[in-house]
Amino acid sequence: MDLGLNGKIALVTGASKGIGLAAAQALAAEGARVALVARSGDALDEAVRGIGSAGGEALAVVGDVSRADEVERVVAEVRRRLGDPQVLVANAGGPRAGTPSGLDEQAWADAVQLTLMSTVRLVQATLPAMRRGRWGRIVTITSLSVREPLLNLTLSNALRAGVTGYIKTLSQEVAAEGITANNVAPGYTATARLAELFADAAAERALVETIPAKRLGTPEEIAAAVAFLASEPAAYVTGQTLLVDGGIVKSLM
């Protein structure tokens, strides 16, 4: 299937490793010109070299999307060096773990900036050009927790659900303008974040036994869903949350 992404300009945040990097690689493999954004310059440079070696075109932009001024600067730099982003993949690291009673106000404030406001600001910075061009794809990376809250991940449960509600509402506003807005909700995926949450090998094995597929997902499998939602063939898919979870979420909706 031709995804119709050749020559499109894509901006992917949290792109130095894990799901963000895999998404950037998948878009570049489809011919998109990809700006990779993350806080680690060395890791970004390595990621860009890898994409270039595979025949893709990529640009590294160091920035912290939890800060409003940094979002503005990052998008301005991408615009100056590549052009206006037509595809936005909003991906940020998960907020800290904790129970509802174990989180102070500062933890909540930091998580709001990282998980919710980074997406809102990235959309605000890129949407005007998408509207002028009458074409755009907005994809966020959330979590299966938007369907089934996860024990000890209070901040993620609350704020990723907020992102989902925001994207659903946005999709209604821009659907007639050739712009789609969707979420990809990964299940348990083999990333550094999962290793942080399940440092004990026995705990990870027990987790895997609860997954119908009997294995963890890979970043590349999540990235394939991102690439589809960013594509031309996905033009009639909007306002959706696509679970990529090996079947672990049991709810119908």
Image (spheres, grey):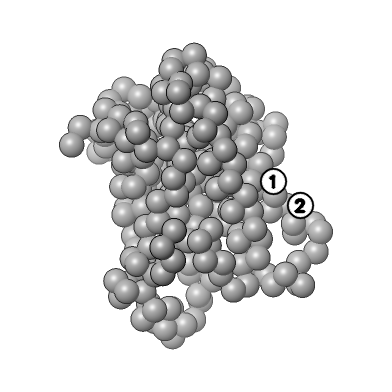
Residue sitting at x 62%, y 49%: 162
Residue sitting at x 43%, y 32%: 180
Instruction: Tell me the amino acid under the disc marked 1.
Output: Gln
Q: Looking at the image, which residue sits at the far right?
A: 105
**Marking on residue 97:** none
Instruction: Tell me the amino acid under the disc marked 2.
Output: Ala
Residue sitting at x 75%, y 59%: 107
Horizontal relation, residue 25 to residue 72: left or right:
left
Q: Give percent across and percent down for residue 92.
A: 55, 48
Horizontal relation, residue 58 to residue 95: left or right:
left
Q: Looking at the image, which residue sits at the far left?
A: 1
- Relative to 122, residue 184 above or below: below
Q: Give percent across and percent down for residue 13.
A: 51, 41
- Which residue is identified by label 2? 109
In three-dimensional space, the C-alpha distance between marks 2 and 1, rounded to whole angstroms, equals 7 Å
Q: Nearer the viewer, residue 122 or 73?
A: 122
Q: Give percent across and percent down for residue 6.
A: 27, 25
- Which residue is identified by label 1? 113
Q: Quadrant of residue 105?
A: bottom right
**Quadrant occupied by the C terminus:** bottom left
**Circles 2 and 1 in contact, beta carbons < 8 Å:** yes
**Quadrant occupied by the N terminus:** top left
* Residue 66 in view (yes/no): no
